[in-house]
Image (spheres, grey):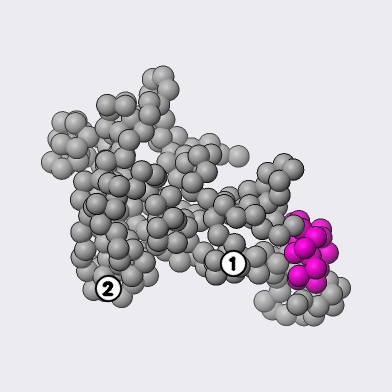
Amino acid sequence: MLQSEAMSRQAASHSPTFSPLYRQIRGLITRSLESGEWGPGDLIPSESELAVRFGVSQGTVRKAIDEMAAENLLVRRQGKGTFVASHNDPRSFFRFLRIGANEGELKPLKSIPIECWRAKAGPDVARTLALEPGAPIIIVRRLLRFGNEPAVFDEIYLPGDLFSDLTLDVLKAGGMSLYSLFETKFGVRMIRADERLRAVSADRLSSELLQVPEGSPLLLVERVTFTYADKPVEWRRGFYSTQHFHYHNELG
């Protein structure tokens, strides 16, 4: 239980690690999400209940929840309450997939798993995923199609300890988005991602899968995805066909 807000502010203001009280409440809520007290899709306690639990004002709780909702950790539903965000919510699908059609609307998406195998982390993977060199990893290759048009060839690196039961059969039988599968079957929720974009030329493998001539321009989107506590849990190299598609991101 936290002290009163006035006492907390007075004590914290003299500390070099001062954090606003609502940020402390956000941290406590996040720890409850991380521990599984409230899982994806669950209704969390009301603002008044959380205020009593943490010994703070309802306004402080509201500010913490507002910030978490803005970052897609929580979802407010009018008249129903606040829920833990889930990748199973269709509204969250394009949050991580930033793609648009050069002409017309995007056709229905199909994810086609190609390969899934176990390996040992080389220097680049180890550094990116904060692993020891040689640690077990899983590598996934898959193709995204919109209608009959191949759009993205993904090569995905995952920590082996978190996804030890992931196989090609599991991927093919998933029947859901990759992040929904990670959340539902492995308890790993993707919270945020850092991306870097650069132009590359299609090599033999990507040209075959994306059905473009070898040497064609592609957009390489390198993504590192993090779960709670800013732990990196995925390194993805997505090769985007620029023939019929483009990377699309709305800012502001």
- Where residue 245 appears, as percent x and y from the top left, is 35, 29
**Helix or strand or loop: what does disc 1 sit on?**
loop
Residue 56 appears left or right of 243? right
The amino acid beneath tag 1 is: Glu
- CA gap between label 1 and label 2 equals 30 Å
**Helix or strand or loop: what does disc 2 sit on?**
loop
Do the numbered discs 1 and 2 sit on residues whose CB atoms are within 8 Å? Answer: no
Q: Is residue 178 above or below residue 55?
A: above
Marks 1 and 2: which is nearer the front?
A: 1
In-front residue for pair 147/104: 147
Residue to which mark 1 is pinned: 37
Residue 61 appears left or right of 115? right
Q: For residue 152: magenta?
A: no
Q: For residue 54: magenta?
A: yes
Residue at 38% x, 29% y: name it: 108
- Where residue 7 appears, as percent x and y from the top left, is 84, 77
The image quadrant that residue 148 belongs to is: top left
